Image: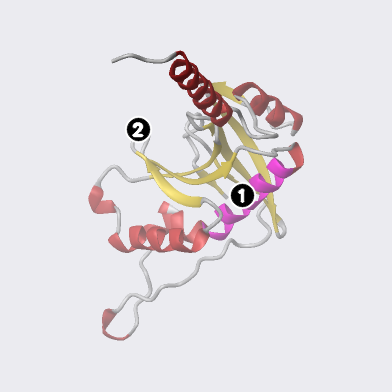
Amino acid sequence: MQLSRRGLLTGAAGGVLLSGAVARGAEPAPGALTEKSLGELLESLTLKPDKQQQRYDFAFLAPFDDQKWELSMSAVLSQDGTSIWIMAWLDECPKSASEVPRTALLRLLAENDKLGGGKFFAYIPSNRRFVLQQVIPNDNMTSARFKVILQDLGTTVVETHSTWSVAGWNQAAPTGPGGTEVQTAGRVSPGAATTTATNESKFASPVVK
């Protein structure tokens, strides 16, 4: 088969256009963070991030009504750099499956449907921890915007405390007629100075009131 000079030029031009489109697709979005600038952003918020490979661990103080919750969080870029994953570390799951009530897990799943905004509960098998995660697009990111996102995630941690608190699972649930379990929404008692939910680097006291 013979190829004309014109055909070769047309094919070459098409290849250049295709490679250019791929290159443009790989370009970061405006205002996107890199691994380095993510750490710098956290430092600008005076969060003192501790880098663990690609992940940054830090403590975040989340005010809620008259309380202050010190949350242990992590932030990491996705593999392709198009999104940022933020995690609030919660309680450790009991070692024995018999200590995990089915209704507790169902409540976590039901809560996932309500959260929205890229937030969801997850389980980390390597350390048997529950986390509240949020996935956000990595674009147009500023320190002010990132702080608002952390505050929103922290508020959700506090508001859903009765759902993810393992300590609450061990308390006998009130029952109604016929022994039917009655679901009650827990409330954090006012006046507590600071409540902490710590991450995997500080597992001694996952939740302290």
Residue 148 shown left or right of residue 178 in the figure: right
Amino acid type at circle 2 is: Ser
Q: Earlier in the sequence, mark 2 or mark 1?
A: 2
The reply to whether callout 2 and callout 1 are in contact (CB within 8 Å) is no
- x, y percent for residue 69: 64, 48
Q: Residue visible at 47% across and 34% down?
A: 203
Q: Is residue 200 above or below residue 91?
A: above
- x, y percent for residue 180: 30, 79
Amino acid type at circle 1 is: Gly
**SS for callout 2:** loop
- x, y percent for residue 136: 57, 44
State the image quarter where residue 47 is shown. Answer: top right
Q: Residue visible at 65% across and 54% down?
A: 192
Task: Give the CA separation, mark 2 to mark 1.
Answer: 23 Å
Q: Nearer the viewer, residue 137 or 121?
A: 137
Q: Residues within 10 Å of mark 2 (few under 14, many from 20)?
A: few
Q: Residue visible at 64% across and 21% down?
A: 36
In the rendered image, which quarter contains the N terminus? top left
State the image quarter where residue 144 is shown. Answer: top right
Residue 147 shown left or right of residue 122 in the figure: right
User: Majority secondary structure of the magenta segment?
Assistant: helix
Which mark is on residue 126?
2
Which mark is on residue 154?
1
The range drawn in magenta is 145-160
State the image quarter where residue 123 is shown. Answer: top left
Q: Residues within 10 Å of mark 1 (few under 14, many from 20)?
A: many
